[in-house]
């Protein structure tokens, strides 16, 4: 099993157990959070226009 991204990721912002990679796509952040079971990932969509795609 692997986790990858098609391009280089920007420098993450670290907040405790959470890494936020800003603008991995236009107006989309990638958040990774370490937890007791492993990790979780979340794409944060910042605008309704981007969400429509």
Image (spheres, rainbow, N blue to C red):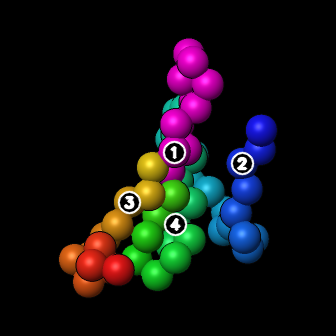
Query: Pointers 2 and 1 in contact (CB under 8 A)?
Result: yes
Instruction: Please determine whether, in this image, residue 35 is positioned above or below residue 16.
Output: above
Residue at numbered disc 4: 22
The CA span between labels 3 and 1 is: 10 Å
Q: CA distance from mark 1 to mark 4?
A: 13 Å
The boundaries of the magenta stretch are: 31-41
Of the 4 image quadrants, the one containing the C terminus is bottom left
Residue ID for mark 1 = 41
- Which residue is disc 3 drawn over? 44
CB-based contact (under 8 Å), mark 4 and mark 3: no
- Which of the 4 image quarters holds residue 10? bottom right
Who comes first in sequence, dot 4 or dot 3? 4
Q: Residues within 10 Å of mark 3 (few under 14, many from 20)?
A: some
Q: Earlier in the sequence, mark 2 or mark 1?
A: 2
Which residue in the structure is indicated by mark 2? 3
Residue 5 position within the rendered picture, expressed as x and y whole percent measured from the top left:
70, 63
Marks 2/1: CA–CA distance: 10 Å
- Locate residue 23 relative to residue 2 in the image: left or right: left
- Please name the residue shown 45% across and 49% down the image: 42
Q: Please identify the residue farthest to the left as the structure is shown.
A: 48
Mark 2 vs mark 4, foreground winner is: 2
Q: Is residue 2 found left or right of 41 in the rendered image?
A: right
Q: How many marks?
A: 4
Alpha-carbon span between mark 4 and mark 3: 9 Å
Question: Marks 4 and 2: in contact by CB < 8 Å?
Answer: no
Identified at 54% across, 23% down, the residue is: 35
At mark 4, the secondary structure is: strand
Q: Is residue 52 above or below residue 3?
A: below
The stretch drawn in magenta includes residue 37: yes
Q: CA distance from mark 3 to mark 2?
A: 18 Å
């Amino acid at each position: 099993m692997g986790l990858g991204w098609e391009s280089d990721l920007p420098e993450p912002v670290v907040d405790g157990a959470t890494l936020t990679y800003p603008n991995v796509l236009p107006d989309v952040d990638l958040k990774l959070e370490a937890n007791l079971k492993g990790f979780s990932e979340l794409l944060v969509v910042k605008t309704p226009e981007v969400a429509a795609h």
